Amino acid sequence: MERLIEHDLLKWKNRPDRKPLIIHGARQVGKSHTLLEFGKANYGNVAYFFLENNERLQAVFNNGIDKISTLFLDLGQLSGQTITPGGTLVIFDEIQACPAAITALKRIQETANEYHVACAGSLLGLALNRDAKYSFPVGKVDILNMYPMNFKEFLMAANRKGLADMIGEHFEKDKKLSSPMHELALEEYRVYSAVGGMPECVQEYANRGDFDFVRAKQLAICEIYTNDMVKYCTRTEAMRNIAAYNSVPAQLAKENKKFQFNIIRSGARSKDFADSIIWLEKANIVIKVPKTNEGKMPLAGYEDLLSFKIYLSDVGLLAAKSSLPASAILTGAYGGEMRGAVTENFVAQELAANRIRPYYWESRGTAELDFVIQQQDKIVPIEAKAGANTKAKSLDSFRKKYNIEKSIRVSAKNFGYENGIKSVPLYAVWCIAPDVAL
C-alpha cells in the first residue's frame, strides 16, 4: 500500500545535509513496512535490525563504540549485508528498546553522515526518560511523524486513485462533483470511518471485505497500546493511563466534548491524571486539541492550558472502543452525539496527518467552534457537520467577532464557495494544507 510519507523519505535521501532519520509514530501505523519498501525501491540493499529483545545487537551499542566505521562493520556481519555509504539503507527498528542506539545517532551524524540510517520508533521520549544515562540527540537527527493512513491513502489502497485525484481537483476549483461521484465518495468515507487508517485493518478489509475481521484487528491494536502502558510505566501510572485512554469514547459521546477528569473516575482531579494525558499524547495514540481563547495570530499565544479535547489517533479504533457496529456507521443509524464524535475525530485525524495543529474555540458557553487552524498568516475556522444540515451559528459568531474573511464548513454537502465559506465534503478534508491559504 502506497504511503504519502514516501515522498518525504525520497526528499530526505537526496538532501545534501541529510541526518540520521527517525520516523516517530504510534505502534502499528506502518513505520517499519514503509521503511523496508522504501529501502528496497531506492537503495542497492537494505540492512534491517530489530532491536527489541535482541541482546546481541543491543550489546553492540551498550558496550561502547570506539569508531563508527567499526560499528558498521559489526552491523554488516550481524546482518549478512555489506553496508556501503549511500548504497545501503540501514534500518534500526524499535530503536526505543535500546537507548544507547538512539544516542549513537549523534556520533553517526557528526562523523559518518555518508551512511544512510533510518529508524522506526514508538514511545521514544518515554523510553529515554526511564534511563537518565541517555539523552535524545537534539539537532543531530531528522524527524518525520507518521500517522495512520489518511482518507486519500485509503482510497489509493482501494484502487480508487482516480477518485482521489478527482477530489483534489474539485477542491482546488470549488467545483461540485457529479452526484454519482459525490455519493460514491461519501460511501467510501463511511467505510473509512468504520475501518480507520491502521494499515493492518485496511489490508484486512481489502482482502476480505468483512468488518468482523477488521474489528478483531482493531481491538488487538487497542490491546497492544494498553500492554505498552503496563510495559513502560509503574503499576500506578499504567492504571491511570489505561483509565484515561478508556474514557475517551465517553468523553466524546457527550454534548460538551471538553475533556473532563471526573468522567475517568468520580472525584478525579486534573493533578491525578495530567501526566496520563501527556503520556497518551507522547505515545501518539491520542490527539489533543487545546482551546484557544482568541481567534488571533498566533493561536498558540492564546491557548487555554486547562481546557482541551481528546480524540483517538484513529477513527476506526474509536469505533472499536465504543462498540459501535460497522453497520451503524455505514447507514448513519446511530446516536447524534456519537455521530458527531466520529465526524470530529475523523477531521482531527486528517488535520494531524497533514501536520496541522487544530484548536477549538468557545464563547462563554454560548457558542463553540469545532476547529480553528492557522494557514500561513490567516486564522481559518472550521465547522464540522456529520450530515448535510449546515446551519452553524458558532461559525457565524466567530467570523463576526474576529473579522474572518474565509472559513471552512465540512459536511456531507458537495463542494462550493459562498459568502466567504468554502464547503468541503467530509471526504476532502485531506486536501486542507497547512501552508496553502484558501
Image (tube, rainbow, N blue to C red):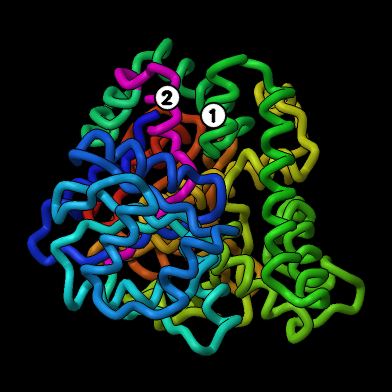
Task: Give the residues drawn in magenta, as a range.
Answer: 142-163
Say few, some or many: other residues with alpha carbon within 10 Å of mark 2 (under 14 / 14 to 19 / 20 or more): some
Amino acid at dot 1: Val
**Does 18 lie within the magenta span?**
no
Q: How many marks?
A: 2
Amino acid at dot 2: Ala
Left or right for 437, reference 97: left
Asked if the residues shown at circle 2 and circle 1 are in contact, with their CB atoms under 8 angstroms apart, the answer is yes
Mark 1 lies on residue: 202
Mark 2 lies on residue: 157
Image height of 167 relative to 351, above or below? above
Of residues 276 and 424, the one nearer the viewer is: 276
Of residues 361 and 264, the one nearer the viewer is: 264
- The residue at the point 55 percent across, 39 percent down is 198
Q: Quadrant of residue 325?
A: top right
- The residue at the point 51 percent across, 35 percent down is 199
Left or right for 218, reference 133: right
Percent position (x, y) of residue 429?
41, 41
Q: Quadrant of the N terminus?
A: top left
